[in-house]
Image (cartoon, rainbow, N blue to C red):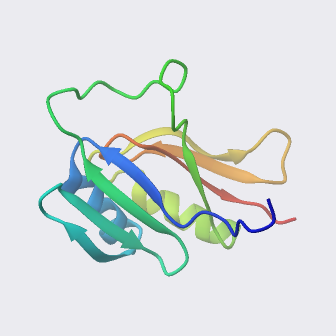
Amino acid sequence: MTDLQGIDHLGLTVSDLQASLGFFTDALGWEQTGGNPSYPAAYVTNGQARITLWQQKGDHRRGFDRHTNVGLHHFALRVASQEALDRLFERVQDWPGVEVEFAPEFSGTGPKVHFMISEPGGTRMEFSYDPR
């Protein structure tokens, strides 16, 4: 359908809203643009992408399993350069609550380079640089 122009925003349910919000704003440098305290939810952007972070309700904090859960497998953010990707990994690898799945490496045989983490609220994220 040619009328579609891309993703407006991505909504993520997270196990710890404040930890996820801090990761996006402090570790990644995104800006909080609003929220909904009654849900609760927080809205963040980097000026190009927009993400809504929703606090998970109840005590259902099972870890995400991309092989058995229906829905989001992961989402990927594009990085401007190999150097920026490496700096970003250095900044987030020891961030409280972050779980590193793998450090920067070729995706397949390259030349795309990526790394994968789970942010503090449990969402699996990929960061990638593709020189093509």
Q: In the image, residue 75 lies at what x, y percent?
A: 56, 49
- Give the residue drawn at x 81%, y 38%: 108
The N terminus lies in quadrant:
bottom right
Image label count: 0
The C terminus lies in quadrant:
bottom right
**Any part of residue 22 in sight:** no
**Any part of residue 130 in sight:** yes
Left or right: 78, with 93 as reference point: right
Above or below: residue 13 compared with residue 35: above
Left or right: 4, with 73 as reference point: right
> In the picture, residue 5 is in which quadrant?
bottom right
Q: In the image, residue 19 lies at what x, y percent?
A: 23, 54
Q: In the image, residue 128 lies at what x, y percent?
A: 66, 57
Residue most extreme to the bottom: 47
Question: Between 50 and 113, which is closer to the camera in this rendering?
Answer: 50
- Give the residue drawn at x 63%, y 67%: 79
- Give the residue drawn at x 24%, y 29%: 61
- Give the residue drawn at x 58%, y 62%: 86
Above or below: residue 34 compared with residue 2: below
> In the picture, residue 6 is in which quadrant?
bottom right
